Amino acid sequence: MSTFLGMPYAPRGVGHLRGDRPFPAAARAALADTQLRRNLGKATRTIRAKRAAVVAELPDWEELRAAGQAIKRHTLAHLDHYLEQLERQVTAHGGTVHWARDATEANRIVTGLVRDTGATDVVKVKSIVTDEIGLNEALAGAGITARETDLAELIVQLGHDRPSHILVPAIHRNRAEIREIFLREMGDVDPGLTDTPAALTEAARRHLRRRFLSARVGISGANFAVAETGTLCVVESEGNGRMCLTLPDTLITVMGIEKVIPAWRDLEVFLQLLPRSSTGERMNPYTSMWTGVTPGDGPQRFHLVLLDNGRTAALADPAGRQALHCIRCSACLNVCPVYERTGGHAYGSVYPGPIGAVLSPQLTGVEDNASLPYASSLCGACYDACPVRIDIPALLVHLRARHVEEAARDRPVPGAEAVAMAAASWVMASPARYAAAQRAGRSGRVLRRGGRIRWLPPPLSAWTAARDAPAPPAQTFREWWRREHGDPDGTAG
Amino acid sequence: MRIALFVTCLADGLFPQVGQATVRLLERLGHEVTFPQAQTCCGQMHTNTGYLREALPLVRRYVDVFEGCGLIVVPSGSCTGSVRHQHAMVARRFGDEALARRAEKVAARTYELSELLVDVLGVEDVGAYYPHRVTYHPTCHSLRLLRAGDRPLRLLRNVAGIDLVELPDAEVCCGFGGTFAIKNGAVSTAMLADKMRSVLATGAEVCTAGDSSCLMHIGGGLSRLNAGTATVHLAEILASTQDAR
């Protein structure tokens, strides 16, 4: 595996950052799923409208976005400093900090910590990073059952499924499907369960309550970690997080190293940006913060696992590193016309949608997620929605360029596309060659039927499979111009 | 005013009527249009597909050809966006700071057609006549790269005889995306299906936009379905008059 400036990528064979097939193939399967299309269209449209309404309320939204971007940029430029400060503060307040270079190390650390408690069950707060490293599978391998407590994560876990959205992991399911999953998998559920949201939530509540009260170990991710005080922060909507963070005796938090922020006051910016961008709420219902251990109150053992897993490699790319600004709000997914039609599974990574298309390839190396930077029409809706102003379209182009450069370096013989692109560049670099190519292209007129072309050879057949192509005109614009105006400056070649 | 036309490779080779309409419109408004014949392509397809090294000679050509021109007009939001937001980036990626600075200067004088008309020439009523039911698709790069806003609509609202109808979900991408339409043909088509549904719901005879590329995509879909709705570039509508259409 090649690396960017020598920094290690997230290792293969562990976790969920790589799909088993390229995006276009996975997308075709998703597009054919009419139920999925309907669920996604309805859900994203609803969230988009809610977000737009609450964002429009704030006169200083653009200033908030700029502030969020500036804080993240500053933090990443001094990441070593803030991580060490965080470690000192957490340690000073009775917590233990562990450094994990990758998924394998993080899983080993967490598994060891749970084993030390003697527990065979853990309750989990919704966390993408633990899904990124495949923690549940690692724990299961050690005989430990991880129980998801977020409603959507519970639906996904009970359905033996994968999350398909950062914020709403079961967005691809509707309530009829959820009812079926609960009846099949919950065991202790009322067989007369209906598919009303209240009934489904109540069933989950009863199911989960027993887990909370008996759990000895809780596992969470983190939305933010304040370096100056050593305070961890989790925001959520359901209250299950608060249960997991306060009831068990041992709390283990796994956090990507990019989640640190310098100061308490920085939360003022992010706690405005995040809920409005993600759930379309002015404020999220539950914001839990804790600093180390408080004797006699809450977990008496706290472990913080700081995870790299390819983040330093992303940080080493001056253009690519802004993907690490992401606060996982998922606004870019909800506005993305590609995501809305394919859903998250097609991306093959726990980070789907536009941000996933720029983050996953940087964590794994572009080679391992080579189709993702192309999974966008570059429409730019994601950039406008991003609360920390990540220029996702520019990043997608940058990663395409990295992919092309790496392929050119690693392949002795250039591929068909590279040859075609080089040829087109050579032709268009000269007006004479370009005019000659236009004349040659006119032979395409033999394919026209009634002024349109209905079939073209591969790879252009991907166009004519569903769309007519225009027939080349009898004369090009420049031919018309010369006929009308001559060639006064003699530059036609 | 003397205005140089960058016609774009797509309009040059496949939609010459768009370039002709741009010339006719600007001349009718009393301006002199030049066409530097050494021009070829802005390189956007190369850049957006990741072939920046191959885009570099095209960036250099654009700068060489148009550096001596005052105002430059482009009948495409997307190509204008590439000139404005990508040319200097491509030059810098290969360490050519001098070219990047020259590219920035030329880009600052490069305008998409509706920007040129409204912002530079200060005209919103171009004296056009177009007696058809029309809906306008604001292309992604006009909308979100150039922030062209409602300039095209302001121009269209002043066209005599036009029956302008609003396009539902107008700001959603049509699914073209350059080589995206080939590499991710299935997703591109799914996006196109929704765009066509919106266009057809308006009952318009004509769907217009400021980009030949997006119109080629939408028009290719409508034509395949024999849907009875045509695609016509904004320049063609603005160039139409009562005397000659």
Image (cartoon, rainbow, N blue to C red):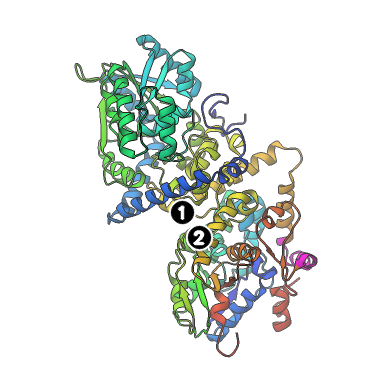
**Residue A270's image quarter?**
top left
Q: Circle 1 is placed at which residue position?
A: A381
Residue A442 is a magenta residue: yes
Where is residue B5 drawn, in percent x and y? 60, 74
Amino acid found under the numbered disc labelled 2: Cys
Task: Tell me: residue A77, above or below residue B14.
Answer: above
Can you name the residue that lies furthest to the left here? Answer: A296
Q: Give the quadrant of the C terminus of chain B.
A: bottom right
Q: Nearer the viewer, residue B194 or A229?
A: B194
Alpha carbon separation for disc pair 1 and 2: 8 Å
Q: Which residue occupies 62% across, 31% down? A: A2
Amino acid found under the numbered disc labelled 1: Ala
Discs 1 and 2 share one subunit: no
Q: Residues within 10 Å of mark 1 (few under 14, many from 20)?
A: many
Task: Tell me: residue B50, above or below residue A111.
Answer: below
Subunit of mark 2?
B
CB atoms at circles 1 and 2 under 8 Å apart?
yes
SS state under label 1: helix
Where is residue A29 drawn, in percent x and y? 59, 42
Q: Circle 2 is placed at which residue position?
A: B140
Task: Tell me: residue A349, above or below residue A139.
Answer: below
Task: Name the main secondary structure of what is drawn in magenta.
Answer: helix
Q: Which residue occupies 43% across, 49% down? A: A42
Where is residue A330 drawn, in percent x and y? 41, 43
SS state under label 2: helix
Q: Nearer the viewer, residue A16 or A413?
A: A16
Q: Is residue A492 left or right of residue B107?
A: right
Magenta segment boundaries in residue numbering? A428-448
Can you name the residue that lies furthest to the front here? Answer: A192
Q: Residues within 10 Å of mark 2 (few under 14, many from 20)?
A: many
Task: Tell me: residue A259, above or below residue A301.
Answer: below
Residue A432: in sight, yes or no? no
